[in-house]
Structure formats: structure tokens, C-alpha cells
Amino acid sequence: MCGIVGYIGNGNVYDVLIKGLQRLEYRGYDSAGIALLTPDNKINVYKTRGKVSALENFCRDKNTESRLGIAHTRWATHGEPTDNNAHPHYSEDGNLALVHNGTIENFKVLKDALQQHGVHFHTETDTEVLVQLIEFIKVQNSCSLLDAVREALKQVVGAYAMAVIDKNEPDQIIAARKSSPLVVGIGDDEMFLASDATPFVDHTKNVVYIDDEHIAIIRKGEPLRIVDFENKESKVSVKQLEWSISQLEKGGYPHFMLKEIFEQPETLRDCIRGRAVADQGKVILNGVLSNSEKFLDANRIIIVACGTSWHASLLGKSLIQQFCRIPVDVEYASEFRYSKPVITDKDVVIAVSQSGETADTLAAIQIARDKGAFVYGISNVVGSSIPRNTASGTYIHVGPEIGVASTKAFTGQVMVFTLLALQIAQLKGSMPQEEIQAMLDCICRMPEYVAEVLKLDKAIQRLSLIFTYARNFIYLGRGYSYPVALEGALKLKEISYIHAEGYPAAEMKHGPIALIDPGFPVIAVATKSATYDKTVSNLMECKARGAKVIVVATEGDEEINKIADCIIRVPAVRDVFSPITASVPLQLLAREVAILRGCDVDQPRNLAKSVTVE
Ligand code: G6P
């Protein structure tokens, strides 16, 4: 949450920073701001409530000439999203400007102490405390900015990625992190820093991931230096970025979300490439193969995740239990950490996160590691904190996901869970080889099936028109379709702000059926499966009370015509694969309803994609 970006080099600083902020806007868009060090060593800070486009308008008549700068896009935690609370924040004497992502938990104590020394505060943010503290230490100790930052951070409790500039020490940006992401991009005679690599991928592919509790010293004309809080020098390890610029652009689509929905045949291909080796009857998931004894000896697998990743994890549970006969629990990462979990070194914990940066999931990983469990990560963003903090893992390889509502990451996560379950089953011998072969053949055809489903987009557009009146939706499913119902409801909530609940279909009669009145929309995922007949009975119960029933059904299923008011037909696949084909039309439906309601599909209100606060 919140994105920070910095640049030092010969390019147009303002343009680089604004472009960088636009790429980071998925991390929050309550306010945006920029601090520019002018050629004559003054700091100009421009900031405003609203999105980066509002900042651009604000800066139109301002002096943006500069030699280096830092910038910020905010998801508000402490203090309302006002102009005043927008970052960058500056020290009282105006010497320093600072941007910050994260939360400073002891800000009140630090603020009180600084106020007792006569420091005045101008905002309600925790961040202002940090910049004032650095300035205070710098003046008190007559020390360098670097030393002041080191000393200040030793006093700070919380999570942060921050960057600060000082007009008395020009040509330098000091940046640091603890539990929030920070990467440095190294170009020709220029350096970038950002919350992730998206702001500078068109300038350089050389990245350095800054480790926790480390400080990056970015100086013009000098190589990057990294020190810890004790000023001990660390090795600078440069990695190569694999992303391309086209992955970060809309490519002719009106929204990233639509682009990402339509990318799914390709992203699934990328996800299974080299892993589902059907012609050899093998799954090759190196992270599992190289740790096979951990999975084979596991008493239990615990999956921790948040949001959409949690829904994919529910499917992971069903797949692993069915294929491998290993007990699996799925926990919200945010609840897990406070539940005094019973974990032993015989447990395997799988942490699932698209961004690889979700604070609660990272905290859950730490608990599992402390208890001696083997921790495995499933993530999308290469080099993010979760892969760096887990013993092993698998990338879903779906490319950057920018729309705040997750789509291609969900299908990628489900696919990785399918591969993982098959891999363990193959190692364990818990599934006959013919069955594994049949599964692999189906996996290889999944991209084609999803391409078929995407042809429904016009029909779904028409279908969405009749639901513009509805203020409540219920999504139903059983077995593998239940997490799909949860995910379908979440998509609708997130981007159209319509209240939607996902339920196991049979639970309707234990309460929610009381909500049904004539015309109430019920969306059911009722593809052919072992629970199909039961689901149909549950739908009859809704229909009898006047519900308008829309069904995601299997091609060729004529029986469903008797109860469904509208039918979305998806290709016939084995029930374990139906979550992938059935979730895609629900992604399209949510998007269409959101468009009809005039909502911002890519940047829904109050949300951010990477949740780096607890
Ligand atoms: C946020 C996003 C969701 C996402 C969740 C977990 O709430 O808006 O789309 O599912 O975080 O994120 P993660 O990156 O850990 O999968």
C-alpha cells in the first residue's frame, strides 16, 4: 500500500517520477505528491489529494526543473486523504523531504518527545514524525543525513520503505526498508528506486532488491551502496528483470482488468510450460521435487493467504486432500497469526500471495518459520518478499497484474495448486498413473478451454444489462464450485460496490434463503460434478421463492434449462478443472456490471492491490 519512487540521473526527473507514480497507482490512489531538488538546491514539494492525474494538473504551471526527486502515491492509513496529509512530508526547516510506505507504530511516543523539544507538526500522519525525527537527530548530532537516518530508524517501530532527500546534501537519495518492499534500478548514469520495478522497467532491467533493515545510498556518479543500521557495508547483488514494457500497458484494452482477463489463455500456458509434461506423463515442479521428503513426511499442510489468494487456497485444499490424502487447513493469514496456531516441524505451510508483499501473509510466514515448519511460497512477483522469505516455492508466472481486482493471478494460483497436488500425488503414489496422465492431458488443453469461455464476453455484456437494478447478489456453489462462488462475489463487490455473498448452495436453507424475494439475483456455479444434482435441488428452492437464477453450466447440459433464467455455458471439463473455466465468466460479469454503474474498474474506491499494512 502506497507507492514510492525516486530518480537521480540526466533524464527529465519530473517525467520519470510521474510515469513511475502512474505505474504504482495500483498500490493506492488517495493522494499523490512529488519533491524535486532544483538545480540551485532548493526543494519544491507539490502534492494533492486524488490520483496522479490530479498531481499532473496541479504541477502544470509549476517549476519542475530538477536534478533529482522522490514521489509518492498514497493509500491513507494515518490521517485523512487531504492535500496536507499527502506525501512528501518535509522537516520543519524545510531542509528534508521524505516519502514513506508503511506504518510507524510508535509515532505517538516519538511525536510527543519531539514536541517536548519544541518541534511543530503540521499534519496528522505518522510519516511526518519520521522526517522531523531525522532532521532533529541531524541537527542535534551535527551528523550526515545517512547517520541521522540510521539513528532515527533504530528508534522506529513498524513497517516502512522510505526515501529522503536533503537540500544540504544534494545529489543523494537515502532510502531504507523494513517489512515493506524497495528495489533500486541501475541504469547508465542513472538510478531509480521504487516499491517495485514497474516504474523503471523501460529504463533498465538491472535491479537490486534491498533487504530488510538495510539502507540504500544512491548518489549521482557513484555506484550504489547498501549498509545495515550499524553502517556495515552489504554486498550489492544485481538481478535481471524478466518483465517487458508491453506487460505494463493496456495494449488497446480500455482497462487493465479486461486485458488481464483476456490474457488468461496465455498466462495459463506460461504457468504450465515445462511443468505439465504430458508426453512423459510427468509433473515437474522443482520446488516440490527438491523438497519431496518435506511434503511426503508432512503431518498436515496449512495454507495461509488473503483475499483472492485465500479463495484459490480453498481450492488448493480440496485438490491436495483429494489427490494426496494429506490433511489440509486453510487460514486467513491475518487471523492465523493471532490464533496461537499449533505448528510443528512436521507441518508444511504454504503461503499464497500474488504480490508477494501482503503484510499479514509475511507475518504468518514468520510464525511458521519460528515454529520450525517448512514454508513454501506461491507468488507472482519475482524477487518479492514472500519468495525471499520462504524455503522454496513456485511462481505462477502470469506477468504483472495491475488491475486491483485479481483475475489472471487467481487462475494461475489454481493451476499451480493443481500441479502441486499432482506432483505430490505422483511422488507419493496416491493416484494411479493413468489418472495423472489424464489430468496432464486436460491441463494442457486448459488454455484452449479458457479461450472458448472468453468468446462469451458479448453474451455476458447483454446479460449484465438486466442486473443493473440489483443491489444484492448471492453466488452459490458446492464442492470445487464453492470457492468459485466466493471469488465471483468478491469480484462484484470489489469493482461494482454491489453487495454480494458467496455461499455453499446447501447452506442457503440455514439462513440466507430468507433474503430471497421475487427478482433476487442468484448466480449459481452448477457445472457437471458429483454434487450437480444436489446443487440443482438447492436452486429449485431459490427459484420457488422467486429468485432470478443465472447458472454457469456445462455445455450440453439441457436439464438446467428447466430452472435457469439465464445460462452461461462453459466447456465440459473434469470437475477439478471447472474452477478455472467457471471463474472467467464471473470475472467478465463483474466487470460489465461495474462499467454499467460507471465505476472505476481498475482502481476501485478504498482498495489497493498490494496490502503492506496489517
Ligand atoms: C488485496 C487485493 C486483492 C488480493 C489481496 C491479497 O486485498 O485487492 O486482490 O487478493 O490483497 O493479495 P496478495 O498479493 O497477497 O495475493
Image: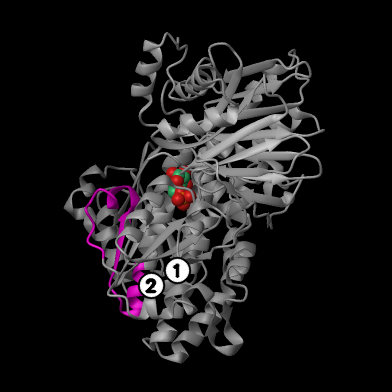
User: What kind of element bears circle 2?
Assistant: helix
CB at disc 2 and ligand 1 closer than 8 Å: no
Q: Is residue 149 left or right of residue 469?
A: right
User: Element type at marker 1?
Assistant: helix
Image quadrant where residue 155 sits: top left
**The magenta segment:** 317-343
Side (left or right) of 150 relative to 264: left
Task: Locate the C terminus by quadrant.
Answer: top left
Query: Which residue is drawn at the image coordinates 72% and 48% (left, top)?
Result: 251
Q: Tell which circle, 1 or 2, labels the residue nearer the N-terminal end.
A: 2
**Marks 1 and 2 close (CB-CB < 8 Å):** yes
| Label 1 crowd (10 A; few <14 / some 14-19 / many >=20) | many
Q: Is residue 251 magenta?
A: no
Residue 458 placement (x, y as % from top left): 60, 51
Q: Give the labeled residue for mark 1.
A: 417
Q: Amino acid at mark 2?
A: Leu
* Label 2 sits on residue: 319
Between 405 and 597, the one nearer to me in the picture: 405
Tell me where residue 96 appears, x and y as whole percent: 59, 20
Image coords of residue 310 (percent x, y): 38, 55
In three-dimensional space, the C-alpha distance between marks 1 and 2, rounded to whole angstroms, equals 7 Å
